[in-house]
Amino acid sequence: TLSMSTSGPLANAKFLYKNLPYDPLTDLTPVAAIGEIPMGIAVSASSKLGSIKDLIDAARAQPGKLSIAHPGTGTIGHLTAELIKAQSNVTAISVPHKGDIAAMTDLMGGVVDVISIPITALIPQIKAGKIRALAVTSRQRLDSLPQVPTAIEAGLKGFDGQNWYGILSPAGTPAPVVNKMSGEIAKILAMPDVAEKLQGQGMDPYYTTPEQFTALLKSDLAKYTRVIRTAKI
């Protein structure tokens, strides 16, 4: 049995729930990461904020007044907002919503100032001119939004907040089986039609070996542990 999961249940759930019935490092075997969807930091089209610097300056000018919407407590969108606050040393109100659509509705309605959600949900509204993106959290600009800078380009040094997707098997799966499956996944991801399909859904497809996927998981576990404890989520 294989599982395909996003980073949320693997990289942060361990620190959000008191009685999580699994441990991502001991109960699962990483097989391959297959791609990622970055978060988008955006404002309404009528907002006076034109950049991440403007956002940070506004938060510093009036501590605790700026509001940042996200899809829900503990989501990668939420943790991305907390990462920005921690890295910039600013205070702002984190406003949880029941999903991306509810958060975007409040942004466009002027209820909140900023939004932090997967960029895939934002793209239609950005292209329609209803929402303006300040940055994406990927390491490179997106082909679908070439005009939008990365968070690093926008001034957040080394910033990386991805919602990655990966395939895992149960703990104890023999290494030859894991390596065989991982190799087949690499071949599938290299197929142009598969890559095109994933890109069409807003994902940046890539492949990692089981060892690289394990390292990614451990790195994000450490990163989000700090964020969750600092923000007292």
Image: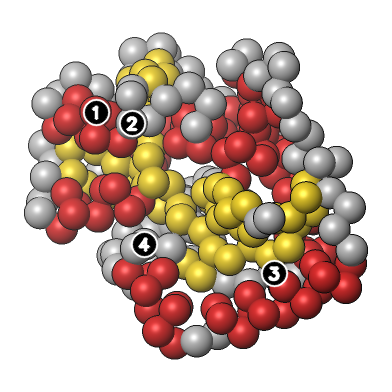
Neighbour tally class for label 2: few under 14, some 14-19, many 20 plus, Cα within 10 Å:
few
Contact (Cβ within 8 Å) of mark 2 with mark 1: yes
Residue type, mark 3 in image: Thr
Q: What's the amino acid at mark 4?
A: Gly
Q: Nearer the viewer, residue 85 or 163?
A: 163
Q: Is residue 205 above or below residue 170?
A: below
**Residue 223 x/y as whole percent:** 70, 38
Q: Looking at the rendered structure, which numbered label has been put on residue 102? A: 1
Query: Total of numbered circles in the picture?
Result: 4
Q: Is residue 201 above or below residue 193?
A: above
What residue would you read off at disc 4? 202
The quadrant holding residue 212 is bottom right
Q: Is residue 117 left or right of residue 7?
A: left
Q: Which mark is residue 208?
A: 3
Element under label 4?
A: loop
Q: Marks 2/1: CA distance? A: 6 Å
Using the image, tell me which numbered label, if any, was put on residue 99: 2
Element under label 3?
Answer: loop
Asked which secondary structure carries label 1, the reply is helix
Measure the alpha-carbon separation of dots 4 and 1: 20 Å
Between 188 and 98, which is closer to the camera in this rendering? 188
Please give left or right for residue 123 compared with residue 31 in the image. left
- Identify residue type, mark 2: Gly
Whether residue 15 is visible to the viewer of this picture, yes or no, is: yes
Cα distance in 3D space between marks 3 and 1? 34 Å
- Residue type indicated by callout 1: Ala
Q: Indicate the position of residue 134 as horizontal and vertical percent values.
A: 32, 47
